[in-house]
Image (cartoon, rainbow, N blue to C red):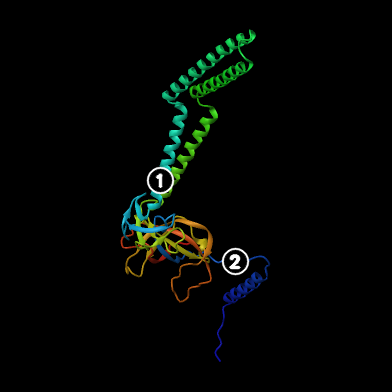
Amino acid sequence: MIKFAVPAAVLAGVLALGIWIDLASNLEGERVDAPTSRDAVFAAGRVEGATREIEMRPQISGQLVRIAVRPGDEVQSGQVLLELDDEAQRHEIALAEADLELAQAQYERLLNGARPQERAEAAATHRAQAAAAKGAKQRLGRVRSLRETKAASAAEADDVTEQFETALAQAEATEARLRLVEAPPRDDDLRIAKARIAAAQARLELARHTWDQTFLRAPEAGQVLDVRVEPGELVGPQSKEPAVVLADARMLQVRAFVEEIDAPRIALGMRAQVTADGLPGRVFAGQVTRVSPRMTSKRLTSDRANERLDTEVREIWIALEQHDGLVVGLRVDVSIEGGR
């Protein structure tokens, strides 16, 4: 048997190390943290436009009569994308316009009062009735004088009295009619007329707004990603499929989904590299510009064999320095450098 001599210094060091390990394992509340990893963080991602995809549907139900755009078209804010049949809405506008015109005419007539011919007629009628009442009064005076001398009978006096009273009542009625046609409009009548005009204007604006909803317009500038309807279809706000999908694709970004084990290591400003299976050999550089403040359920997978599907993820957004060749919706792989 061959024996090796162990130097005393080495033996002492081994014994000291064993003692230190035993002491460390017995210390309560003390632990040694592992050094922080500076390795890259990997995540699955998807290419998006500067805005998220906007799934658009008409605000009212109707039959589609015209499609004004095709997938790939660039559109401006307010540009018409689709048109619905608007015949019913145009009739509603015509009816509302007629109601408004009628209300305005009634208000103007109230302001203007009676026509000059009506005023002249009322004045002439009053003069005639006043003259008749005056003549009846004179006859009544003569009959009363004759009645004192017994030259007129009581019946004749009664008849003349009745004629005078009738003529006087008719004169008063024509005078009231004359004052009415010459009087200015009452305040309450004016308020009623103005309220009718306001209601008619509101109905007209509502009819025009409803008509405008027969056009589906772009809410902002962007690119048409998809059109999922055909002319003749009945479409509306409750349609299962959106009519048009729109996004601002002038600038592309990547939305990546970092698994929970790496989520705390992500920070704004970190550099990132993006690759796509369909573009081998190309690497797109970018920077983390936004980080979600919460975790969400995993919605995008990378199809890796060791990938966990029951984990939560943190969404981050990466602004790309160049994106030639990338398209909205493309799945990509993301590598974030220097995770904390």
Point out residue 7 in the picture as x, y percentages from the top left corner: 57, 78
Task: Say few, some or many: other residues with alpha carbon within 10 Å of mark 1 (under 14 / 14 to 19 / 20 or more).
Answer: many
Tell me which residue sits at (48%, 67%) in the image: 299
Judged left or right of residue 232, residue 290 is right
The label shown at residue 15 is none
Q: Quadrant of residue 153?
A: top right
Q: Nearer the viewer, residue 171 or 318?
A: 171
Q: How far separated are the C-alphas under marks 2 and 1? A: 79 Å
Are the residues flagged by discs 2 and 1 in contact, CB closer than 8 Å?
Answer: no
Tell me which residue sits at (45%, 70%) in the image: 301
From what the image shows, is residue 307 above or below residue 75?
A: below
Tell me which residue sits at (43%, 21%) in the image: 120
Point out residue 215 in the picture as x, y percentages from the top left corner: 38, 52
- Between circles 2 and 1, the one closer to the viewer is 1
- Label 2, secondary structure: give it: loop
Q: Nearer the viewer, residue 303 or 99?
A: 99
Residue 208 visible in the current orientation: no
From what the image shows, is residue 195 above or below residue 160?
A: below
From what the image shows, is residue 13 above or below residue 317?
A: below
Residue 105 visible in the current orientation: yes
Judged left or right of residue 287, residue 195 is right
User: Which of the two discs, 2 and 1, labels the residue nearer the N terminus?
Assistant: 2
Amino acid carrying mark 1 in the image: Ile
The label shown at residue 32 is 2
Q: Nearer the viewer, residue 138 or 187?
A: 138
The label shown at residue 93 is 1
Identity of the residue furthest to the bottom in this view: 1
